[in-house]
Amino acid sequence: MEIKLGIIGYGGMGKWHASNAPKAGVEVTAVCDIHTERIEEAKEKGFVTYASAEELLRNENVNTVILTVPNHLHCEMAILAAKAGKHVITEKPAALSVAELDRMEDACKRAGVLFTAHQNRRWDKDMLTVKKCMEDNLIGNVFTVESTLHSGNGYMHEWHLYKKYGGGMMYDWGVHLIDQILFIMPEAKIKSLYADIKNVLHEEVDDYFKIIMKLSNGITAQIELSTYILDYQPRWLVGGDKGTVIIKDFMCNGKIYHTGQFLDKLPSNIVETVAGPTRQFAPVPPGGIIAKPLPAVESDWTDFYRNVCGVLNGTEPLKVKISEVRRVLTVMEAAVKSAETGISIALEG
Amino acid sequence: MEIKLGIIGYGGMGKWHASNAPKAGVEVTAVCDIHTERIEEAKEKGFVTYASAEELLRNENVNTVILTVPNHLHCEMAILAAKAGKHVITEKPAALSVAELDRMEDACKRAGVLFTAHQNRRWDKDMLTVKKCMEDNLIGNVFTVESTLHSGNGYMHEWHLYKKYGGGMMYDWGVHLIDQILFIMPEAKIKSLYADIKNVLHEEVDDYFKIIMKLSNGITAQIELSTYILDYQPRWLVGGDKGTVIIKDFMCNGKIYHTGQFLDKLPSNIVETVAGPTRQFAPVPPGGIIAKPLPAVESDWTDFYRNVCGVLNGTEPLKVKISEVRRVLTVMEAAVKSAETGISIALEG
């Protein structure tokens, strides 16, 4: 069996799937949108089009849908699609709440259709490089993992600006960044979580957040996102007791740093730095820190659709499980609660 | 009246005051240490020396002492000195606990002598530059202040390795870094605090900490210190709704970043970055971010001793007040409690 995809919503991400899903061997069977100008665009591209999801769902050639409507419509559309007997792939965030997700999963189970979410950033090379460095023990016992995403673009766009449509950066990127941390360390439980969420440039929706998670493996994970920090800090900083991993950006520029052979002990005298006396924070002697290239990882995003196809054919297990998606939403809800109350949340014992 | 200083403890910082206090017009009248080899060193430099604090305190020419003994001895020595009628300057941390500090202050009040702490990092140019940027409103409404101190030197030295002597990085640098944040924003109350403290390379004492403080002015302050992160991140990151301040190091290398004239709105289409589709985190068009030099600040550490002298002569108010020192120790105790329990602490309402 092959995926014959119906795209529900032909906005930014709908168009993206229309061009990219075929790279994974997916046939785009039909497209719908409630905006006529978008339907015209889709027609020009040669797609079979509909003016509503209901009409698209009646197309018997479509066996799977991708939900690329604004976030607040995922739940309603998933239930409609499941009732129509279509497998359901939703864009992220899968739902606005754990309660919504449960209703969606329930509908899919009853209809006997597949349900998954397009957590495409599980295929990001920067994150996979962090995972590899930790799994291959390249910097010893890790104590801190910091996942940072800064932009100078500032203001958001379209429905992302409005709360009722599921806008804001926590829904847009929080769901990716939390998912990545849990994907890197799937066995770790979150013992304690503390979050800060701010509206820096936007009155209605969040555009800054920081989430600190103390994990059962002894590692503290930090996630920070801002749409308005103009000198971007590294995408990843991972500190271990045998070195440091820095990945600067999506392109995986960065290094692994280790202690060099010359760093046996501190200088015996206090060093007068420009800012006063210190030994601990005096410059490391030349050769004391050595930088090496990051390990190479391979990744192909089209595996997402190939996996869905494999699951439908019974040849492989699902990669993006709804239990994982639920866990991410649970963390997100805890972060919102912590930010609102100023109190840390005990999450997973 | 002039300061005639007795230096109690001729280790690293004792020697530092012996060479530096005279730059502020202070006369170093006597030095004591319990180690004979240090006394020999001090004699060679021409100082009047004693083998114990008790003997030094009997020298009537000494009117003020600086306590440069290991941290666990500050309390005992301060009380001895006060009883001997000497003004007391203690190295930082002033005390190992708020309770100790109260005993020290009480002794000084009863003896009618001055009591202050050598919080020398109130004169650090990097911190004063942050303070100036905020006070002069150079980046609009500030939402985050991050104070970071990384070292590749790893292991600590001498008594800093042992808990019983008041070792560990929280006592050594936590007291500076917390003091600086409270000095930058003296009016702000700490509503909520969450901390992580780790032993990365050292079994007995802490060598990593992160403290998050949500302040009543809406700013979240973060302090992070590590003796073993090998690619040092900026000493300061300050984010505002009109720009970003980055100060990389003690030497004040860094910039202020503002939005350029070309950045009116986001690119109208989703941008395919190497790591997937995004608009918000797509590269900013050329000219979208402009960097300017940091403002210049002047600072002279010798003001510390000149201020003490001015206070003794009744011509100026004390710069490092014990009420401020107590607040820092209170925050430190809260941080330790938060780190131990995994629970945030509500501090100042």
Image (cartoon, coloured by chain):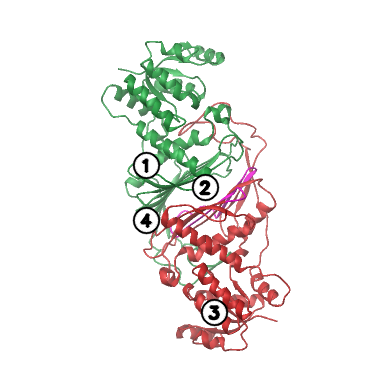
Chain colours: A green, B red
Q: Amino acid at mark 1?
A: Ile
Instruction: Name the residue tied to disc 2.
Output: A342
The answer to whether tags 2 and 4 share a subunit is yes
- The secondary element bearing badge 1 is classed as helix
**Distance (Cα) linking label 1 and label 3:** 54 Å
Q: Is residue A296 visible?
A: no
Instruction: Name the residue tied to disc 3.
Output: B79
Q: Confirm or deny contact between disc 2 and disc 4 (CB under 8 A).
A: no
**Disc marking residue A242:** 4
| Span colored in magenta | B215-244
User: Image quadrant of residue B89?
Assistant: bottom right
Q: Confirm or deny contact between disc 4 and disc 1 (CB under 8 A).
A: no
Q: Chain of mark 2?
A: A
Indicate which disc, 4 or 1, sits on the residue closer to the N terminus.
1
Q: Confirm or deny contact between disc 1 and disc 2 (CB under 8 A).
A: no
Of A48 and B345, nearer the camera is B345
